[in-house]
Amino acid sequence: MLRVVPRIERGERVNVGVVLHCRSRGFLDVRCEPDDRRLLALAPDLDLPAVRQHLEFVRLVCAGDPASGYVAGLPQEERFGWLVSPSSTIVQPSPSHTGLCADPAETLGWLLDRLVRV
């Protein structure tokens, strides 16, 4: 889960995306759908373009796009580890969870429906 934490000191957060990695299928992807209204309700002065830029960077890392710099060249498992490492930025990953699925792309959509979309 990716969350936006507009004000670290308040501890409020909004789920904005999901990262899913399936090593056995060679799958690593992210889907993000930040809800501007919810984010601005917590922090009216939030820099939404900066949040979107950060989420785009996460997408580039997942895809292994060279535009994301050094991390793009890492193996998929290491890119996933980089994406889910705790951080103190405004976009933060939640603790990661393990599970099983038959279709990672379908599961990613299901998780987005369940955990991000209102």
Image (cartoon, rainbow, N blue to C red):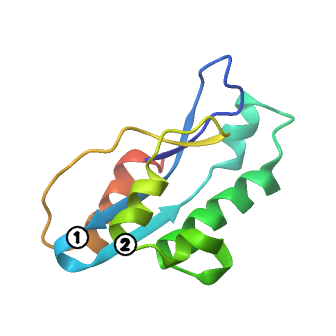
Q: Nearer the viewer, residue 39 or 96?
A: 96
Q: What residue appears at the point 73 percent right and 32 percent down from the top-left corner?
A: 41
Q: Earlier in the sequence, mark 2 or mark 1?
A: 1
Q: How far across and how far down the image is residue 117, in percent?
A: 47, 51
The answer to whether mark 2 and mark 1 are in CB contact below 8 A is yes
Which residue is drawn at the image coordinates 48% and 55% (left, top)? 83
Q: Which of the numbered marks, if any, corresponds to residue 76?
A: 2
Q: Secondary structure at mark 2?
A: helix
Residue 4 location, quadrant: top right
Residue 53 horizontal/vertical position (percent): 73, 61
Q: In this rendered view, identify the residue nearer to me: 77 or 107.
A: 77
Q: Position of residue 45 (x, y in %)?
A: 87, 35
58 up-or-down from 14: above or below = below
Name the residue rendered at 16%, 74% in the picture.
Answer: 24
Residue denoted by label 1: 23
Residue 71 occupies quadrant: bottom right
Left or right of 105 in this view: 16: right
Q: Using a 10 Å C-alpha cutoff, classify the residue at mark 2 as few (fewer than 14 neighbours), some (14 to 19) or many (20 or more).
A: many
SS class, disc 1 = helix
Residue at 31% of width from left, 64% of height from top? 21
Which mark is on residue 87?
Answer: none
Count of numbered tags: 2
Amino acid marked by disc 1: Arg
View extreme (top): residue? 10
**Along the line of sight, the residue nearer the viewer: 44 or 22:** 22
Q: Which x, y percent locates residue 88?
A: 62, 34
In this picture, is 92 found above or below 30?
A: above
